[in-house]
């Protein structure tokens, strides 16, 4: 006689309560109740202090007549904003050129950093360390005063683009190298096993995935690059801050002019930062979740022979049924 080992209806599985997940749990431990209270208290104190600073600044502006409507009346005219937007176009132009050149040079430097040739790794690493250490302002002064002494006088745009490209190429290289190293080694090995050459494996398999992983970081670096173009006022390049300086000198309205320039920077950089955050959320959403193993049905315990119902041993039909 046998007992029924697997029931027709699976045993009910207890529903597990979903645990709260923290996006940066791998960087630091999730705060407990006391830590969350301290964070909330610190946030409230910071907001109150920030509001007090803003209120004190507005009170000082009002005391010195900076909030007089007559001082802000010129910024209700389209000609003033059109003058500043021309500077914004110059800023975007310089930032776009630096982004393209810096990204191209950064790819080459990143490939050199992960190369198997020792002297190539050394040269690329030396360039990156020097470019990240030397101030951009010093390189701009070198382009402005040093190169004309030896007969090299670049156009005004390139006096700003070249120093920014030298500095940002090193940052782009480190970001791209991090994206390459974040991929499993099996990606390149699988491409090589299919008959691809190492250059083809890097071009068609590794680099596209690395760029997709570090796209939010690249956009964030472009925001920083956009702010660095404000150094163009040193070489008299027509960018947003330079136009703001000229407008402030012409209107004799220093604070209102720079407030308008700040608002433009906030709108542009805030939009790019929001775009980077959206890309980062999209990349996390596209990441495949951990596979969930199917739950096996519960197996009933084998009944003891003494617990089985008694049957008539002389009736083979009933015995087989039991």
Image (cartoon, helix red, strand yellow):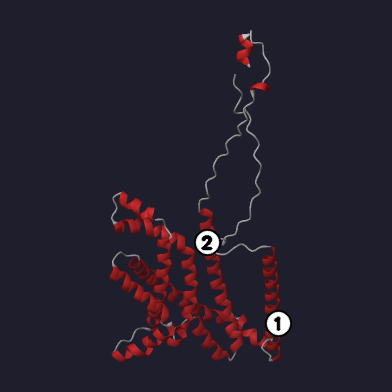
**Vertical order, 64 against 161 (above or below):** below
The answer to whether residue 105 of the structure is visible from this angle is yes
Residue shown at 45%/59% (left/top)?
Answer: 212
| Total tally of numbered discs in the picture | 2
Residue 158 vs residue 247, the one in the foreground: 158
Question: Of discs 2 and 1, which sits in the foreground?
Answer: 2
Give the residue at x 62% y 10%: 317
Q: Residues within 10 Å of mark 1 (few under 14, many from 20)?
A: few
Between discs 2 and 1, the one toward the N terminus: 1
Residue sticking out furthest to the top:
314
From the viewer's side, name the closer residue of 268 and 37. 37
Which percent across, then down, holds residue 254?
Answer: 59, 89
Residue at x 43%, y 65% (from the top left corner) = 178
Q: Is residue 311 above or below residue 100?
A: above
Q: Is residue 29 above or below residue 56?
A: above
Q: Residue 211: x, y in percent?
A: 42, 61
Q: Nearer the viewer, residue 219 or 248?
A: 219
* Residue 86 shows in this picture: no
Q: Label 1, on which residue?
A: 55
Residue 165, picture quadrant = bottom left
Quarter where residue 169 is shown: bottom left
- Residue at disc 2, secondary structure: helix
User: Helix or strand or loop: what does disc 1 sit on?
Assistant: helix
Residue 95: x %, y % from top left: 44, 74
Quadrant of the rendered structure where residue 5 is? top right
Is 81 left or right of 47, judged from the image as shown?
A: left
Residue 305: where, in percent of width, then height? 64, 22
Work out how far the residue at label 2 is from the one at label 1, CA to CA, in angstroms: 35 Å
- Residue 50 left/right relative to 244: right
User: Which residue is tagged 2?
Assistant: 280
Q: Nearer the viewer, residue 31 or 145?
A: 31
Report the quarter where the C terminus lies: top right
């Amino acid at each position: 006689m046998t007992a029924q080992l697997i029931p027709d209806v699976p045993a009910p599985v207890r529903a597990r309560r979903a645990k709260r997940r923290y996006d940066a749990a791998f960087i630091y431990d999730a705060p407990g109740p006391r830590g969350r209270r301290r964070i909330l208290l610190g946030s409230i104190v910071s907001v109150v202090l920030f509001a007090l600073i803003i209120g004190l600044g507005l009170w000082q502006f009002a005391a010195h007549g900076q909030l007089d409507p007559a001082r802000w009346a010129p910024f209700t005219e389209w000609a003033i904003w059109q003058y500043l937007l021309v500077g914004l176009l110059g800023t975007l132009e310089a930032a776009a050129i630096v982004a393209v050149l810096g990204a191209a040079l950064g790819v080459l430097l990143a490939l050199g950093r992960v190369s198997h040739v020792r002297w190539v790794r050394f040269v690329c690493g030396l360039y990156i360390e020097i470019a990240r250490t030397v101030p951009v302002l010093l390189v701009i002064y070198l382009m402005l005063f040093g190169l004309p002494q030896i007969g090299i006088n670049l156009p005004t745009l390139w006096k700003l683009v070249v120093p920014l490209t030298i500095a940002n190429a090193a940052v782009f290289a480190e970001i791209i190298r991090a994206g390459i190293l974040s991929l499993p080694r099996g990606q390149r090995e699988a491409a090589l096993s299919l008959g691809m050459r190492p250059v083809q494996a890097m071009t068609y398999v590794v680099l596209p995935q690395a760029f997709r992983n570090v796209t939010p970081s690249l956009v964030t670096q472009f925001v920083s690059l956009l702010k660095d173009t404000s150094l163009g006022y040193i070489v008299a390049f027509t960018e947003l801050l330079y136009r703001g300086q000229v407008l402030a000198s012409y209107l004799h309205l220093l604070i209102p002019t720079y407030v308008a320039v700040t608002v433009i920077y906030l709108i542009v950089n805030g939009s790019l930062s929001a775009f980077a955050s959206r890309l980062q959320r999209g990349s996390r959403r596209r990441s495949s979740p951990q596979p969930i193993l199917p739950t096996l049905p519960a197996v009933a315990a084998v009944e003891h022979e003494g617990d089985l119902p008694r049957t008539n041993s002389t009736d083979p039909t009933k015995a087989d049924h039991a």
